[in-house]
Image (cartoon, coloured by chain):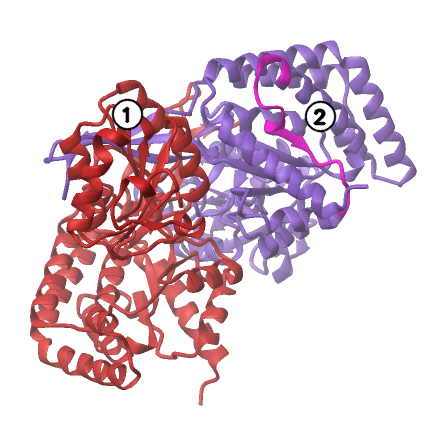
Chain colours: A red, B purple
Amino acid sequence: MEQLQDYTQRIAKQAREAAVELSTISGATRNKWLKRVAQELRDSQSELLAANEQDLKSGTAAGLSSALLDRLRLTPSRLEDLAQAVEQIAALPDPVGEVIEGGRRPNGLQILKIRVPLGVVFFIYESRPNVTIDAAAICIKSGNAVILRGGKEAIHSNLAFASILQKTLKEVGLPEHAAQIVESTDREAVGQFLRMNQWIDVAIPRGGRSLIERVTAEARMPVIKHFDGICHVFVDESADEQMAVDVLINSKCQRPGVCNAAETLLIHQAAADRLLGRLAEELQKRGVELRCCPFSFPKIPNAVPATEQDFRTEYLALVMSVKIVDSIEHAIRHIREYGSSHTDAIVTQNTAAAAKFETCVDSAAVMVNASTRFNDGGEFGLGAEIGISTDRFHARGPCGLREMTTYKYVVRGNGQIR
Amino acid sequence: MEQLQDYTQRIAKQAREAAVELSTISGATRNKWLKRVAQELRDSQSELLAANEQDLKSGTAAGLSSALLDRLRLTPSRLEDLAQAVEQIAALPDPVGEVIEGGRRPNGLQILKIRVPLGVVFFIYESRPNVTIDAAAICIKSGNAVILRGGKEAIHSNLAFASILQKTLKEVGLPEHAAQIVESTDREAVGQFLRMNQWIDVAIPRGGRSLIERVTAEARMPVIKHFDGICHVFVDESADEQMAVDVLINSKCQRPGVCNAAETLLIHQAAADRLLGRLAEELQKRGVELRCCPFSFPKIPNAVPATEQDFRTEYLALVMSVKIVDSIEHAIRHIREYGSSHTDAIVTQNTAAAAKFETCVDSAAVMVNASTRFNDGGEFGLGAEIGISTDRFHARGPCGLREMTTYKYVVRGNGQIR
């Protein structure tokens, strides 16, 4: 039997070779493949659901929570959504070969900065099996080979997706190793891939904090992280009441379990008397538990006192921290200290306050009079996303096709020398 | 006495605080500082030369080679060049706050992608003390705080530069910790900084292979590497003779000790009879030793047989590997296998060959009918560079001011919700 180290090396080398081949294949062929994948997702519905059923049974036996089981579940309508998502990716413009900038130097050299794929992506994710197809589609559309390592609870679903990927890649003449699913669920396999920086260009972990911390510590290649979203809504002195209610409720309640949902309400002390009662009432009406600082606590019926740790917590649930701040500067300091540089919003009617917040809040997305929930590849018009980066490096915020690329310089001359 | 760990933590935290402050300081103030630094380099010439003299004495006593001593040496004219380089950086456009892209979404949201500093840069470099000033100027111009760790052989020169940096930062009202020089020459200090990813955003090593490998292995933050340049000149079947001579000689001989100098000549077999004799003669006339493959060896008087390892070697000297290839595909395969993805050139009169080389050679800079020596921040019009990245991630090729930045999204609405 093949040893684990031999297996992971083989996968990584195959991915590298596929990436080299992919870099010269036309966008038309990559799009043809995407359309075939969409069709195959529809045609293989029963096989996919049967494989998924195995995962659901093992998950139930292993005592997974109903929330986790729901994330794991494929249904005909979820498969159709997935097929449509793949078709949408096919319809997006090809990022590969785009001339980002270009010009002519005084000596006549033409210098072009051209978009090229990153190379080999190692994508490590948990639970939802449809991410397998999303990630493969985004990586290959942008000219990258991808090694997909899903959670062991979704292994049967992922292997069923893998057979669709293999079959369609071969059919359209793309390298069959352009997308490979790691069949070993051994934890050590991840560690081995993370050391193979000679073949793998970037690692993208998407999952809980412990996964991301492990990848950051072990990876010898760059990592695009998808970390906590401790997002704030700051209601400034001059905020319009109805706008404050709308933005806050949408940020907190529209989908509380996701990273761009708000976790903390900051409110300017000069607005607290006017607005805090109404805001708290609207939140509580929707089932949100409020954990309050000493100044806001007495103003809100049924409030819970907040601990220091609450302000550092990504609840991902109908719980919100509340704090009254002295000034916009205080709000900005709080966000810098307790936030995760993901998404932070201000509600204000004052242009100077808006400008200050935009400049001083150092988050991937700074929202002025808009819901935190807009920090999303689809909402930004990127068309698809492989995650929302909380890194400052290479890519920040929603990562779509372009964020899966780098560039090279092409210099055209007619014999220039220095 | 302060323990090393306390010292490095203090430096890193101070840098983080300075970076926060710097992010809101105007470009005018940053430029004012640059101009003061240039002036101070002129005014403090005698102190700087005296400090440098100490390093030169220790270096001589320690038996440094004359080449290394020359790199270490400051002279009045080198200081004047440095002052002028700083003035040129002051004159470049401010990258901070640049709107990279922007548009309005169908729901009325205005989405802006805005250039912001990376944050805190940890720059580790060897030998040449003028790099201290260059790096500080580039980092602060682009709104970053920088921790500078130079080689121990340049410590007196670097501390003299440090006192200029501190003095001028205070004078113009910039945070005094925006540029800090690590006073400890303890190797462990580097290891400690590399683990402080909570305060440091990027590590940039510039030096020998062992330094870069150490930083890659230990860093918990992203690294911009400045690795080997094993650069090729490929003389295609259709190459013009004089252009081939000019480009090859310039690539190899104009400054053989730098990373964008060529190390290997590849020549199409159909061009070898026509061109190889002349090319070899021109190289040998300039003192270049030729290490040749079995096919080129018999064609060149006084050639040396090449080993496999020769084709993987960055000579940085008047030595060149020579290989005859069957086809352009063979040349491209050789470059992929033996090159370092730094800079590779083709000399050709054939547009199809040029296009193929541009597409298939995966290097930071691909040159068509131009010298490899053009892969340089100044030549590309970036104005200044902190290094030439051999990474694919974030920044590739020459790294100037923009490459020291990232972006954030600013989203302006009037109450939009999802």
- The quarter of the rendered structure image containing the C terminus of chain A is top right
Q: Residue at x 15, y 59 (%)?
A: A86
Q: Residues within 10 Å of mark 2 (few under 14, many from 20)?
A: many
Q: Is B336 situated left or right of A235 in this image? A: right
Q: Is A294 situated left or right of A317 in this image? A: right
- Answer above or below: position of A335 versus B39: below
Residue A28 location in percent, x, y?
17, 53
Report the residue marked by disc 2: B162
Kindly report which numbered mark, 2 or 1, lies closer to the viewer in this rendering: 1
Q: Secondary structure at mark 1?
A: loop
A382 or B220: nearer the viewer:
B220
Q: Amino acid at mark 1?
A: Glu
User: How many numbered marks have been drawn onto this rendered protein structure?
Assistant: 2
Which residue in the rendered view is the most extreme toward the bottom?
A: A1
Residue B280 location in percent, x, y?
60, 43
Residue B329 among those drawn in magenta: no
A10 or A183: nearer the viewer:
A183
Q: Residue at x 11, y 72 (%)?
A: A75
| Range drawn in magenta | B170-186
In the rendered structure, the residue with mark 2 lies on which chain?
B
Q: CA distance from mark 2 to mark 1?
A: 44 Å
Could you tell me if residue A204 is visible in this image? yes
Q: Amino acid at mark 2?
A: Ala
Residue A398 location in percent, x, y?
29, 46
Residues behind callouts 2 and 1 on a single chain:
no
Report the residue marked by disc 1: A237
Which residue in the rendered view is the most extreme toward the right?
A: B61
Could you tell me if residue A93 is visible in this image? no
Q: Is B273 situated left or right of B310 in this image? A: left
Residue A396 location in percent, x, y?
36, 43
In the rendered structure, the residue with mark 1 lies on which chain?
A
